[in-house]
Image (cartoon, rainbow, N blue to C red):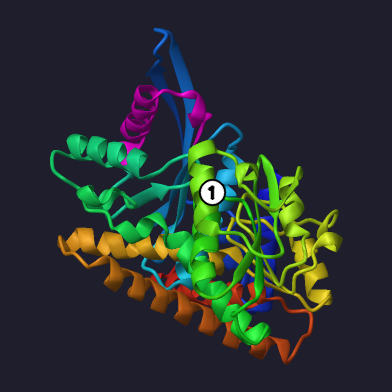
């Protein structure tokens, strides 16, 4: 079993115990309802044939259709996909959405594919999984290695197979295909809202506080951008090329332009350049945002993290053992399935628009997203404070878990599953 899946199941078991739920709830949530593995043949530009391995994990449908992204990455595994689908079940429940958790993946490095090859892979994935997808069954979205362009190909292929336009079958589509422009930055924007709310309660406000962002992909870029608009000073950013650190502050918009044009944050003209991409986690900053991938803050390096507040933009970036170490020092970790829920909340808003063939403006949509994220945070923070009064060893993730699991448990009980 992968370390990531072990960590997720360990967290799940802890939540069931803390909430006093029956063991049957853990048994149901520790295994996905359905796992589909597919082979996707693609005729390459060279004329040769490649067959790619793909997955779709449909974890839990107690609260509604499955919902989760599709990841194109050379290192994906089925076990990690199961872990991500489990987190989606918790994330959707915590956000109050009418969704269960799902996740998909293809083992491929999309950077090595031409546009035509990538399109054929995207369409092949949909053809292979068509019987178990749909606007009321399983609604995918982008993840690492996929984007709105890939969603456009996928919704087009699904619509052809169905025989009608079905925009609600995929989310995070281009605006011209019934997407919403907020979806491009929704995850990072949601992270920024949660960062602001947490800083106000833990650090007395956000104005002038320093923020370090590890991972400068879509989530990290927009997290840094919107946080800077909310008064934070971004002092570090990183990607695989290394880390840029400037205690006087980084011009986030300029850094985004450099990343877009050169592909590397270390080409940013200013600040100290550090070779370690994880160095952004260790700099002097009030808030650290691990926005890259899982298992970044571990027992081996947690001693280097100086921040009082950690906001998880990535999925599973802090191991359970490291989180407990941070808690002992008085630091607070805002858990991933609360902090990075902006993407799926926005997907829900897009889905509602698509089902009704109705449209909100970008400003209206962003306001709805901000309200939902703020309300979610307030609910979790109140539960966290309540639980801390009886035990100092409680972390914020525990409060979020109990809230999410309660809603799932109530639904399962009403259905007669428990």
Stretch in magenta: 106-131
Residue 135 % position (x, y): 27, 53
Image height check: is 343 above or below 402? above
Residue matched to label 1: 217
Q: Nearer the viewer, residue 302 or 64?
A: 302
| 123 is within the stretch colored magenta | yes
From the viewer's perspective, tell me whether residue 275 is left or right of residue 42.
right
Residue 125: quadrant of the picture = top left
Q: For mark 1, give the secondary structure.
A: loop
Residue 82 % position (x, y): 56, 48
Q: Residue at x 62, y 42 (%)?
A: 267
Q: Nearer the viewer, residue 45 or 199?
A: 199
Image height check: is 169 above or below 414? above
Q: Residue at x 21, y 58 (%)?
A: 354
| 108 is within the stretch colored magenta | yes
Q: Residue at x 50, y 29 (%)?
A: 111
Image height check: is 301 above or below 111? below
Residue 204: quadrant of the picture = bottom right
Number of numbered markers: 1
From the viewer's perspective, tell me whether residue 192 is left or right of residue 120.
right
Residue 100 % position (x, y): 43, 60
Q: Residue at x 84, y 60 (%)?
A: 304
From the viewer's perspective, tell me whether residue 69 is left or right of residue 208.
left
Most prominent secondary structure in the magenta stretch?
A: helix
Task: Indicate the quadrant containing the N terminus: top left, top right, bottom left or bottom right.
Answer: top right
- Dot 1, crowdedness within 10 Å: few (<14), some or many (≥20)? some
């Amino acid at each position: 079993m992968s370390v990531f899946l072990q960590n997720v199941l360990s967290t799940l078991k802890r939540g069931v115990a803390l909430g006093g739920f029956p063991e049957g709830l853990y048994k149901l949530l520790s295994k996905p309802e359905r796992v589909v593995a597919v082979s996707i043949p693609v005729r390459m530009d060279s004329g040769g044939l490649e067959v790619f391995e793909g997955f779709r994990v449909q974890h839990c449908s107690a609260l509604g259709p499955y919902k989760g992204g599709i990841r194109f990455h050379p290192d994906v595994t089925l076990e990690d996909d199961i872990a991500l689908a489990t987190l989606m079940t918790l994330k959707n429940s915590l956000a109050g959405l009418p969704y269960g958790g799902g996740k998909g993946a293809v083992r491929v490095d999309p950077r090595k594919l031409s546009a035509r090859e990538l399109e054929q892979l995207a369409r092949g994935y949909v053809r292979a999984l068509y019987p178990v997808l749909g606007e009321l069954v399983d609604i995918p979205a982008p993840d690492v290695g996929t984007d709105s362009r890939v969603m456009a190909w996928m919704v087009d292929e699904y619509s052809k197979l169905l025989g009608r336009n079905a925009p609600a079958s995929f989310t995070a589509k281009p605006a011209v295909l019934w997407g919403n422009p907020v979806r491009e930055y929704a995850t990072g924007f949601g992270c920024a809202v949660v960062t602001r709310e947490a800083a106000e309660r833990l650090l007395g406000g956000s104005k002038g506080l320093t923020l370090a962002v590890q991972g400068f992909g879509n989530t990290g870029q927009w997290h840094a951008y919107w946080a800077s608009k909310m008064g934070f000073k971004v002092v570090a950013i990183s990607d695989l090329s290394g880390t840029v650190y400037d205690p006087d502050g980084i011009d986030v918009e300029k850094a985004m332009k450099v990343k877009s044009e050169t592909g590397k944050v270390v080409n940013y003209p200013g600040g100290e350049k550090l070779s370690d991409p994880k160095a952004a986690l260790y700099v002097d900053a009030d808030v650290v945002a691990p926005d890259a991938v899982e298992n970044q803050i571990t027992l081996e390096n947690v001693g280097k993290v100086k921040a009082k507040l950690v906001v998880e933009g990535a999925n599973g970036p802090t191991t359970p053992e490291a989180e407990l170490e941070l808690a002992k020092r008085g630091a607070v970790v805002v858990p991933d399935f609360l902090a990075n829920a902006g993407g799926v909340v926005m997907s829900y808003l897009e889905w509602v628009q698509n089902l009704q063939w109705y449209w909100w403006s970008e400003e209206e949509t962003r306001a709805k997203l901000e309200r939902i994220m703020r309300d979610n945070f307030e609910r979790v923070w109140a539960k966290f404070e309540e639980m801390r009064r009886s035990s100092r060893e409680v972390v914020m993730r525990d409060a979020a878990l109990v809230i999410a699991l309660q809603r799932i448990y109530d639904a399962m009980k009403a259905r007669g599953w428990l």
